[in-house]
Amino acid sequence: MRDVRLVLFVFLGLAAASAVFLAWRVRRTPRDPRTWLSIARGGFSLALILVLLGAFAALAFGVAFELFHRILFPGGNWAFGADSLLIRLYPYAFWQLSAGALGILGIVGGLTVWHVCRRRARSLANSTTR
């Protein structure tokens, strides 16, 4: 489970670095519509990528699950026997529901960022043209 913790911390670190970068960019140029449009595009891109990955996972979850683990855990230490305590505690359905819930949260979050930042960019663009 050390490998899982490392992957989790890397993803959390990337998310934190992204949030710091966005805060820095907004603080530096808060009235620039291009800043808000670029953030909106990022939110929309996140939602689109998650929809595409979600469609792939919905059609072939087993393949997506194995591909995910082969990429992030190349040592092969992620394959456990069916009688393993870890498999009994966290069955296949748990991972399907967890992946779906995280995907839906990411899509809703990305679309929310897209909507809010797009409106902010339009508002700023209208106020500078007056």
Image: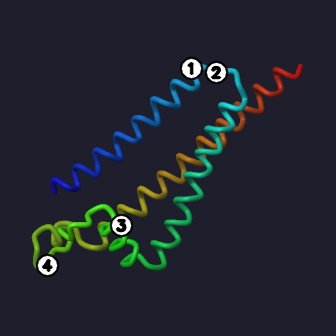
Q: Nearer the viewer, residue 76 or 54?
A: 76
110 versus 19 height, above or below:
below
Residue 19 placed where, x, y %?
46, 33
Residue under pointer 2: 30
Q: Element under label 3?
A: helix
Using residue 59 as the reference point, say whether residue 28 is left or right of it. right
- Given contact means CB atoms under 8 Å apart, are the residues at marks 2 and 1 in contact? yes
Q: Earlier in the sequence, mark 3 or mark 4?
A: 3
Q: CA distance from mark 4 to mark 2?
A: 54 Å
Q: CA distance from mark 2 to mark 1?
A: 6 Å
50 versus 70 height, above or below:
above
Q: Quadrant of residue 97?
A: bottom left
The kind of residue on which mark 3 rests is Phe
Label 3, residues with CA under 10 Å away: few <14, some 14-19, many ≥20? few
Which quadrant is home to the C terminus? top right
Residue under pointer 1: 27
Label 2, residues with CA under 10 Å away: few <14, some 14-19, many ≥20? some
Residue at the outermost front position:
75
Residue 58 placed where, x, y %?
47, 74
Q: Nearer the viewer, residue 42 or 74?
A: 74
Q: Earlier in the sequence, mark 1 or mark 3?
A: 1
Residue 40 placed where, x, y %?
64, 41
- Given contact means CB atoms under 8 Å apart, are the residues at marks 4 and 2 in contact? no
Q: Between tags 3 and 4, which lies in front?
A: 3
Q: Earlier in the sequence, mark 4 or mark 2?
A: 2
The kind of residue on which mark 1 rests is Arg
Q: Which mark is residue 81?
A: 4
Residue under pointer 3: 68
